[in-house]
Amino acid sequence: MFVVKKPVTINKTIRLPEELVKRLEIVASDKDISLNQLIVQCCEYALKDLADDPIDKGQQS
């Protein structure tokens, strides 16, 4: 049976440098995805590839 799932999200206000936002908007537009989707993917990629990340090892700092 097909079940529609809605991802759980929260709203947060963050401040980014204007030039970074402009660059991200260009990439999002070129890739035909939302700015939000791009930022999520960038953050996930950065966290996954973070060297010696205690979160990935189940440790807390």
Image (spheres, rainbow, N blue to C red):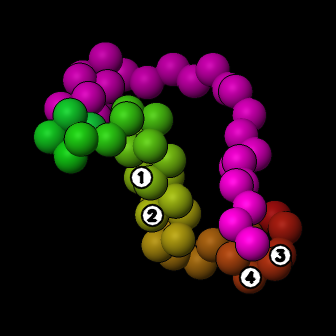
Q: Where on the picture, by quarter, is residue 33?
A: top left
Mark-to-mark CA distance, 3 and 4: 5 Å
Mark-to-mark CA distance, 2 and 3: 19 Å
Disc number placed over residue 1 in the picture, else none: none
* Residue 3 counted in the magenta span: yes
Between marks 1 and 4 in the image, the one whose residue lies nearer the viewer: 1
Between marks 4 and 2 in the image, the one whose residue lies nearer the viewer: 2
Q: Is residue 25 left or right of residue 8?
A: left
Would you name the residue on which mark 3 appears?
59
Amino acid at circle 3: Gln
Q: Mark 4 packing: few (<14 Cα in 10 Å), some, or many (20+)? A: few
Q: Mark 2 packing: few (<14 Cα in 10 Å), some, or many (20+)? A: few
Which SS class for mark 2? helix
Could you tell me residue 1's position as x and y percent? Answer: 75, 72
Mark-to-mark CA distance, 3 and 1: 23 Å
In the rendered image, the quadrant that contains the C terminus is: bottom right
Amino acid at circle 1: Cys
Residues at badges 1 and 4 in contact (C-beta under 8 Å)? no
* Residue 37 counted in the magenta span: no
Magenta region, residue range: 1-26
Q: Where on the picture, by quarter, is residue 39?
A: top left
Would you name the residue on which mark 1 appears?
42
Looking at the image, tell me whether mark 2 or mark 3 is earlier in sequence order: 2
Residues at badges 3 and 1 in contact (C-beta under 8 Å)? no
Q: Is residue 17 left or right of residue 45?
A: left
Mark-to-mark CA distance, 4 and 2: 16 Å
Residues at badges 2 and 1 in contact (C-beta under 8 Å)? yes
Residues at badges 4 and 2 in contact (C-beta under 8 Å)? no
Residues at badges 3 and 4 in contact (C-beta under 8 Å)? yes
